[in-house]
Image: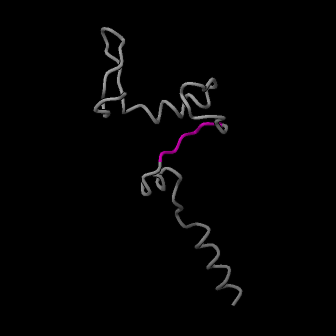
Amino acid sequence: MRCLFTSGLLLVACARRETPVEAGIRTQTLLVGNGGEPATLDPAVSTLMVEGRLIRAFFEALTETDAHTSQPLPAAAERWE
């Protein structure tokens, strides 16, 4: 009985586990290795790099920058007010 139990434990311990990246892909979850908790996610008042990384990730696809004028252009965003 002990041998069977030990064999079962070894099989479970050696089984392939889902990585955080694989889980994020499966659940459509954005994973950001940020390091700390942000104090705010308001772009107008954020001052820390921790917040900046998340804010850039959230707004990345909404706008883009014109290469010639450096002005914001809509990307995924149709418009903004």
- Give the image location of residue 10, x and y in percent: 63, 72
Look at the picture and state if 39 lies above or below 74: below
Look at the picture and state if 7 lies above or below 50: below
Q: Quadrant of the C terminus?
A: top left
- Check residue 54 for magenta coloring: no
Characterize the magenta stretch by its predominant secondary structure.
loop
Please give left or right for residue 59 compared with residue 53 in the image.
Answer: left
Residue located 46% across and 36% down the image: 58
Question: Closer to the camera, 44 or 24?
Answer: 44
Quadrant of the rendered image containing residue 38: top right
- Check residue 33 for magenta coloring: yes
Look at the picture and state if 6 lies above or below 52: below
Residue located 53% across and 52% down the image: 20
- Give the image location of residue 29, x and y in percent: 47, 50
Magenta range: 30-35
Please give left or right for residue 36 compared with residue 59 in the image.
Answer: right
Look at the picture and state if 2 lies above or below 20: below
Please give left or right for residue 9 compared with residue 64 in the image.
Answer: right
- Give the image location of residue 4, x and y in percent: 64, 85
Residue located 35% across and 29% down the image: 80
Residue located 47% across and 34% down the image: 57
